[in-house]
């Protein structure tokens, strides 16, 4: 969570933080690359605090803020095997628009990753 926080602050995105008793337990980053478009850069919840609704509590104000700022297209990329995150954004009206396989560079060389590009159209 800490690495994402520092990077997201440098990008100038809207950053939302969830705290419990003064301890940061979740973070979300939202960017507005063009008028009418919002990019959900990411959402992280500390592993010890998952499955408590923190992701939903972070996503709600992000979606509300995006609508207030006139966003009618929202985008996110989620690994296709991250079923909980897919379930979360689906509950907010996101629909899968595309799926592609790409190579992921990380500690396990040559691991293939999969991502889903999902988009939400503004309701009403």
Image (spheres, helix red, strand yellow):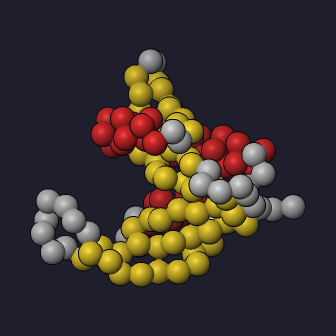
- Percent position of residue 39, x then y: 57, 56
From the viewer's side, name the closer residue of 1 and 105: 105
Q: Kindly identify the residue that appears in the image at 78 percent across and 44 percent down.
A: 68
Q: Judge left or right: residue 11 versus residue 3.
A: right
Q: Kindly identify the residue that appears in the image at 30 percent across and 39 percent down.
A: 3
- Percent position of residue 35, x then y: 71, 55
Q: Quadrant of the C terminus?
A: bottom right
Q: Kindly identify the residue that appears in the image at 39 percent across and 68 percent down.
A: 79
Residue 71 position (above or below residue 44): below
Residue 114 position (above or below residue 43): below
Q: How many marks?
A: 0
Residue 29 position (above or below residue 107): above
- Percent position of residue 2, x then y: 32, 35
Q: Judge left or right: residue 66 versus residue 79.
A: right
Q: Judge left or right: residue 51 versus residue 58.
A: left
Q: Quadrant of the N terminus?
A: top left
Q: Quadrant of residue 112?
A: bottom left
């Amino acid at each position: 969570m800490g690495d994402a926080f520092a990077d997201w602050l440098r990008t100038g995105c809207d950053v939302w933080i969830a705290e419990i008793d003064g301890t940061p337990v979740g973070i979300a980053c939202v960017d507005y690359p063009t008028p009418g478009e919002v990019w959900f850069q990411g959402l992280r919840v500390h592993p010890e605090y998952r499955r408590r609704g923190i992701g939903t509590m972070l996503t709600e104000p992000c979606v509300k803020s995006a609508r207030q700022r006139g966003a009618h297209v929202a985008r996110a990329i989620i690994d296709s095997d991250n079923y909980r995150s897919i379930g979360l954004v689906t509950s907010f009206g996101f629909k899968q628009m595309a799926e592609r396989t790409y190579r992921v560079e990380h500690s396990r060389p040559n691991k293939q990753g999969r991502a889903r590009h999902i988009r939400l159209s503004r309701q009403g």
